Image (cartoon, grey):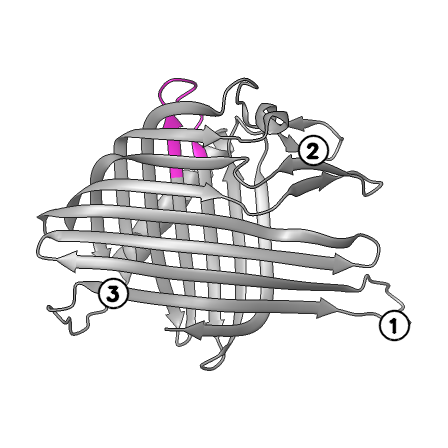
Amino acid sequence: MNLLKLATLTIATVFTLNVSAQETETAAVDTTKTWTIKGENTFLINQSSFSNWAAGGINSMAGNLIFNYDFNYKKDKWSWDNKVLAAYGQTFQKETDWRKNDDRFSLNSLLGYQAAEKWLYTVFLNFNTQFANGYSYDNDNAGTLISKAFAPAYLSFGPGIAYKESDNFRINLSPAAARFIMVGAKSLRGLYDVDVDKFSRNEFGASLDAYYKLGIMENIALENILKLYSNYLQDPQNVDVDYTANLKMQVNKFISVNAAAQLIYDDNIDVPKSDGTKGPGLQVRQVLGAGVTYKF
């Protein structure tokens, strides 16, 4: 956990330094418009093929669909920011057939009332789950079910205070946040430290959510999303970490190249290890592809 805490502090420091080093972009604001809706629909594909290739290789193909929408409200001192993300992807290899490589649904909502310039009293809500069955595979490609729709699902909410520099940078801290880890399938509850006879495990603690989007150069942006949670009721020193980096390169109006990496650590979740055992560990997800993006 010491290395994990160091990494978390490093990420937070980078967020702060980047913000202080960047000038805030300004634009004319239509004061009569209370809702702003933005969205991206992206289809990514990547493919590798080998024929008589001396170095060897495995033919593979992957496709990913990503829907990313923002619904933001602003009137007088009130604001309400909502982000909905849905993603699903499959990878095909001849030796393993089709396997899931991405599966996410998340809703992040932040209701705020302006307390001072750039400071808000807030109430936040986060919900995360997945759409389809997930499996871990052994060396013989035998799959073991480890997740399903709503197994698990995470719901967090609570009051707090936020610093909002712009739509591209904000930090929300809630010192009194409730979190529910819900697992609908009884057979999977043990993997997420939920009692087999209970639908959920309830936690109460402190939550931090940070969002920072950095324009690296024209048509290239790096989006950073950091979530931290400490459970007062059990091992508060073991901070749960969820960090996502999305690199978006827009070739033209419709063609884009996207790369994403997500790191999760939660000591209440058992993950498959290389030696065949299960236990707490760092979860890593990576996606890279080129495809078509439609924005509005």
Q: Amino acid at mark 2?
A: Lys
Sequence order check: which comes first, mark 1 or mark 2? 1
Say left or right for 294 vs 164.
right
Give the labeled residue for mark 2: 273
Q: CA distance from mark 1 to mark 3?
A: 50 Å
Relative height, residue 47 to residue 277 (above, below): below
**In this orientation, which residue lies closer to the viewer: 130 or 250?**
130
Tag 1 and tag 3, C-beta contact below 8 Å:
no
Q: Nearer the viewer, mark 1 or mark 3?
A: 3
Image: magenta residue range: 228-240
Say left or right for 128 vs 103.
left
**Dot 1: what SS?**
loop
Res. 121 visible in picture? yes
Sequence order check: which comes first, mark 1 or mark 3? 3
Give the labeled residue for mark 1: 51
Res. 237 visible in picture? no
Residue located at (25% from left, 56% from top): 20
Give the labeled residue for mark 3: 36
Residue 117, how many percent across, how many down?
Answer: 10, 52
Dot 3: few (<14), some (14–19), or many (≥20) neighbours within 10 Å? few
